Amino acid sequence: MHKKIGLLIVLISFIASEIFFYNYLSIEINTSRLTQFTYYFSLFLFFGMFGKAVFSDVTEPFKIKSYLGNFLLGFAFTLLVTKLTFVFVALIGESINQLIYFTLESEVENNVQNRTTLIKMIATAISSIPFLSFLYGITKGKYNYKVLNVPVYSSNLPIAFEGYKIVQISDVHAGSFDSKRQVKKGVAIINKQDADLVVFTGDLVNNFSAEVKPFIPIFKAIKAKDGKFSITGNHDYGDYVKWDSEELKRQNFDNLLQYHSEMGFKILMNEHIRITKGEESIAIVGVENWGVAPFPEHGDLKRATKGLTNDEFKLLLSHDPSHWDEEVKNNEMNFDLTMSGHTHGMQFGFDLGKFLKWSPIKYKYKKWAGLYENKGQYLYVNKGFGFLGFPGRVGMWPEITVFELKSK
Ligand SMILES: [Fe+2]
């Protein structure tokens, strides 16, 4: 349902802007065969990709996505954003143009056309910014892995864990990848961090557990001295596709759990483990996906923490950051650090430090990227390792987070 509304909005905005775009630039479009071809090719590409998104049935994939297919989908989206920007700037420009015309009356009448020429140049220059940014995002940006170092200070940290290094990755969405080589590059960066612990905070696949099969050997190569731990995300349950039977859906989920273990990850399904150093230990608690409706609430903190004490240091893995505000931060159990993902930073925006970051996703999720604190408890939201839907990342690069635990 959500997908259909989204596609309808895309279609309406495209048609409206296209009518304006063609009328406004009809002389330029019809200047030569080449400009005509470019214009009609962009239309053909957009409707082709749009039709594919609407009419193609999602079936269990056994092959890695093609690089060209992902590129064409991303390019169609790039053209849409570029045209919308052009139309937006041109509409503002022409409104001002008309205002000047009516204010200054007939003696400047002849300048209307000159101003239109100038507006076209400005609109072209401004819309080239999203064009180039998105072009980068769909080619290089989606694999432009960034290592973010995050020290976390806690008065509750056992001395033996001073300087303990935890690498977090999230939202792999294996079914979207179109290059094993690039994913290997990401794994090599993870291994370079020499982590004590590696955690993965959910959404291994988009819909089908089989998506991750070609990548199992790659993720299996991730190294961590004290182990690799994971949880499920909302995409891991196969809830967004139709199944012929409940049995098939359950089998898909069982396979997913099996693949986690084949990759060397211990998946924490509402449970915890303790990492011990000498006499001291910290607890790693993992819950299944817990989200605000329509996302399901499989996560069960009570079950996951059974046997733990309130005062011991706890790292909680929970896919959806909404969980933290709703259940975690005021929980009777103290969770020193919670790691989440889920938002992807919407794969679009900019992140230039704590006070200089923006993405449209911030209007949906209050906690959407980076570190948040409440009474000595921390939440970290990772922007994800992979991508979903739009096959690219613009400004919100794929992330490998390196935490260093420090005592306060
Ligand atoms: Fe995700």
Image (cartoon, helix red, strand yellow):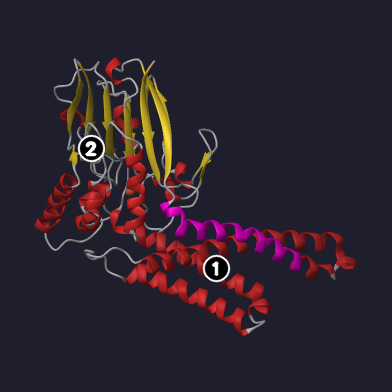
**Element under label 2?**
strand
Q: Amino acid at mark 1?
A: Ala
- The residue that mark 2 highlights is 228
Residue plotted at (38% across, 37% down): 401
Q: State the quadrant of the C terminus.
A: top left
Q: Residue at x 21, y 63 (%)?
A: 60
Q: Is residue 407 above or below residue 114?
A: above
Residue at 22% in and 52% down: 217
| Secondary structure type for disc 1 | helix
Measured as percent of width and height from the top left, residue 178 is found at 34, 61
Left or right? Give the position of 163 relative to 47: left
Furthest-right residue in this view: 107
Split into 4 quadrants, where in the image is the N terminus? bottom left
Q: Residue 404's x, y, as percent?
A: 37, 27
Name the residue tied to disc 1: 16
Res 341 seen here: no
Q: Nearer the viewer, mark 1 or mark 2?
A: 2
Name above or below for residue 384 compared with residue 98. above
Examine the rendered structure and indicate whether residue 200 appears above or below residue 94: above
Residue 50 appears at what percent x and percent y?
A: 41, 69
Residue type pointed to by label 2 = Lys
Residues rendered magenta in the picture? 117-143
